[in-house]
Amino acid sequence: MSQTRKEQLDAICERQLFYLPYFRGMLRAVEQSQYPQELLIEPILDIGAGDGHFAWAMLEGKIVDGVDPWLAPMKEARSWNVYRSLALANGQELPFADGQFPTAISNSVLEHIPGVQDVLNEIGRCLEPGGHFIFAVPNERFRTELWGMSVLRRVGLGFLAQPYSRFFNWVSRHVNLDAPAVWVERLRIAGFGDVRHWNYFPKSALHQLERGHAANLPNLLWKKLFGRWVLFKSRKNPFIHFDRIRRLVDAPLDENGCCTFYVAVKER
């Protein structure tokens, strides 16, 4: 690995882990490392801007327009000063002109949206011919490879494994946990031709993320008391697990990974 790439990955980890609970930060750091920077052509449409942190971490200094259906996170998104504009709107009715953007991104958002085909159709409408839609979603293994499921089976409570999976994904508000073939077909319907995709986030990382929900309690306390998830922005902070997550970011790809990254090209 080149020194430049090492420094880039170090910076990605710091921007994610110094501002988020570690189980969220670890996934976001891996996701950010997968974005092909040369394809992030401005202006960029961010579908599901949320609290704005991810756009700040990856797109600071670029021209970005965000859209989200929820008002509360949008107020926080404004505080990052990364968006040129923020629109309060549903993905099924994007307030933008046909072919307005060369690039659209959506990071761990589409898995939460019922009727996601309509959203993909709208994204396709707003992209110019030859434009790129780049997004990350968990895949079907989020239903089958959970740590809690394996624990229940080991202790003779396998009959609870599926209810546990349904509960975990209900809490996570997952609606679309689908294999790449399903997403590729949706993208084809929405007007995308060439689609590249690859799996990342090994099962061991999913288990770490899953257990991290319980380990999030100190972060939650800091957020309630001081308005921020992380008190000490240091690689030595024991609640951050910086070195462990940094190693994951070095080697996140896995054929049987629990998340999938997509780069789709709008047909001309």
Image (cartoon, rainbow, N blue to C red):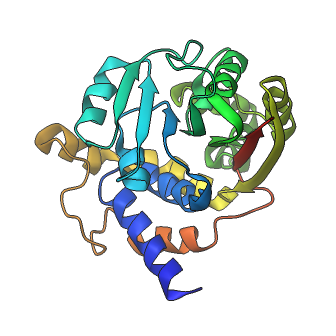
- Quarter of the rendering occupied by the C terminus: top right
| Residue for point 64% across, 40% down | 137
Q: Splitting the image into 4 quarters, where does residue 100 fall?
A: top right
Q: Splitting the image into 4 quarters, where does residue 128 fall?
A: top right
Relative horizontal placement of residue 180, taking residue 125 as reference (left or right): right
Q: Position of residue 22 (x, y in %)?
A: 39, 55
Q: Position of residue 152 (x, y in %)?
A: 67, 43
207, 198: nearer the viewer:
198
| Residue for point 30% across, 68% down | 238
Q: Position of residue 107 (x, y in %)?
A: 55, 41
Q: Is residue 166 visible?
A: yes
47, 163: nearer the viewer:
47
Relative horizontal placement of residue 207, taking residue 79 as reference (left or right): right
- Quarter of the rendering occupied by the N terminus: bottom right
195, 175: nearer the viewer:
195
| Residue for point 12% across, 41% down | 225
Mark count = 0
Q: Position of residue 186 (x, y in %)?
A: 80, 27
Residue 114 sits above or below residue 242 on the image: above
Relative horizontal placement of residue 187, taking residue 14 as reference (left or right): right
Residue 35 sits above or below residue 110 on the image: below
| Residue for point 29% across, 22% down | 72
120, 136: nearer the viewer:
120
Q: Splitting the image into 4 quarters, where does residue 129 fall?
A: top right
Residue 99 sits above or below residue 243 on the image: above
Residue 95 sits above or below residue 226 on the image: above
Q: Is residue 36 visible?
A: no
Which residue, as the protein is rendered here, is positioned at the far left? 226
